[in-house]
Image (spheres, rainbow, N blue to C red):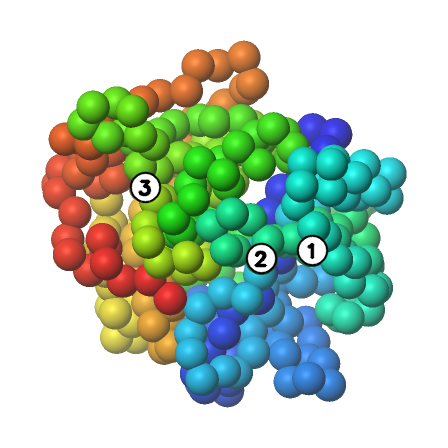
Amino acid sequence: MTGVLRPGHTQLRVLNLEESVKFYTEIFGLVETGRDVSGRVYFKCHDERDHNSFIIREADTAGMDFYGFKVLNAATLDKLETDLNEYGVPTERIPAGELLETGERVRFTAPTGHVFELYYDKTEVGDGLGYVNPEVIIQNRKGISPIRLDHWQIHGADLDGSRDLFIDVLGFSLVEKIVSTDGKLDLAVWLTCSTKAHDIAFVRDERNNTLHHMSFLLETWDHVLKAADLMSANRVPIDLGPVRHGITRGTTIYAFDPSGNRFETFCGGYSFYPDMKPYTWTEDEMGAAVFYHTRELNERFLTVVT
C-alpha cells in the first residue's frame, strides 16, 4: 500500500442541516469536529484518527458532492496527478485549507460523472486513546458508532471507463463483478486499493453521478444487530437487512438518513490480495450476489439513488 491508501473523506448534501447534525451525532454516533464559514459541518468516526471523514452541507437536493481518497505522501499525489493527465483526465488543484484541517487536493471527474479527490495531508486528532499504553475501549460512544468510513457504491453509464481508470491509473484491483447473461458486459464491479473486499463499487446505470450508498464499518455482527435495533427505535427507514451479502460475504443493513440518502452499516468481508483471481457472478444470480439469504432484490434497492 504505497499509492492510494483508503477512502478518506466525502461530502454529502442534506436538506436540513441541523436535523442532519442531530441524526449523525445522536443516532448514527459520529463525532462533530468542526464547522466552516461556508456552513459545512465536519465529523469523524470514533476510531478514525484524522480530523474528518464525513462532511455535510445544506442544499436543495440530496446526494454526494465528491469522494476523497487519501494517498501516501506529497510525491504520490504529484505522481498520480501526472498519471491522470497522461491518461487524458484533466485535474484541478484545490488549495490547502479549503476543507478544514485538510491539505492540498487533486480533483478530477471520472467517466461516470462522479467527482473524486486525492489528498495526503489531514490534521491528525487521534482516537482519544493515545499512542503510548493505550486502552482498547473508546468510552462514551453514542448510537450506532461505526469504526470508519468504509466504501461507496455509485452509479453511472460509463462503468467500463471508470473501472479502467481506477485499475490502470490509480492501482485498484478488481475483486468481484456481476456480468450480463451473455458474459460480455460488466453490470457492476467491486474494486479495492487495500486488502479489504472493496473500497468502491461501480454499477452500470444511465443516471450519471449518482450515489447508491455510503458505507460505514461496524465491529461485529452483534453490532449490526444493535444498529438495527437503534434504527427501529428511532424510526429510521430501513431499506433492507440485517442480511448477508454474497459479494464480499459481509453482513449489512441499508437505511436512509432524514434527507433520503442511503447509508450502509457493514461488517465482515474477506481479505483480498492482488495475486487473487476475482469472483464473477452471473446476472441470473444477482439476487444471491447482493442479498445471499433472501436471494432477491427489492424494487427500492434497485431504483433509489441520490
Density class for disc 3 (Cα within 10 Å; few <14, some 14-19, many ≥20) is many
Query: Relative to 49, is 76 above or below?
Result: above
| Label 2 CA crowd tier, 10 Å (few <14, some 14–19, many 20+) | some
What secondary structure is marked by label 3?
strand
- Where is residue 254? Give x, y as percent: 30, 56
Measured from the top left, where is residue 287 in percent x and y? Answer: 17, 38
Q: Is residue 147 visible?
A: no
- Residue 1 x %, y %: 69, 29
Q: Is residue 256 above or below residue 259?
A: above
Q: Position of residue 286 (x, y in %)?
A: 20, 35
Give the side of residue 292 with respect to residue 44, left or right.
left
Q: Residue furthest front?
A: 88
Reading the image, the residue beneath label 1 is: 107
The nearer-to-camera label among 1 and 3 is: 1
Observer-side mark, 2 or 3, equals 2
> Badge 3 is on which residue?
251
3D distance between C-alphas at marks 2 and 3: 28 Å
Which dot marks residue 115?
Answer: 2
Q: CA distance from mark 1 to mark 3?
A: 32 Å
Q: Disc 2 or 3, which lies upstream in sequence?
A: 2
Tell me if label 2 and label 1 are in contact, CB under 8 Å: yes
| Residue most extreme to the right | 75
**98 w.r.t. 58: above or below:** above
From the viewer's side, name the closer residue of 161 and 47: 161
Determine whether, in the image, residue 170 is placed left or right of residue 130.
left
Quick one: label 2 or label 1, which is nearer the N terminus?
Answer: 1
Q: Residue at x 40, y 35 (%)?
A: 189
**Mark with earlier residue (1, 3):** 1
Image mark for residue 183: none
Residue type beneath disc 1 = Arg
Question: Residue 123, located in which quarter of the rendered image?
Answer: bottom right
Q: Amino acid at mark 2?
A: Val
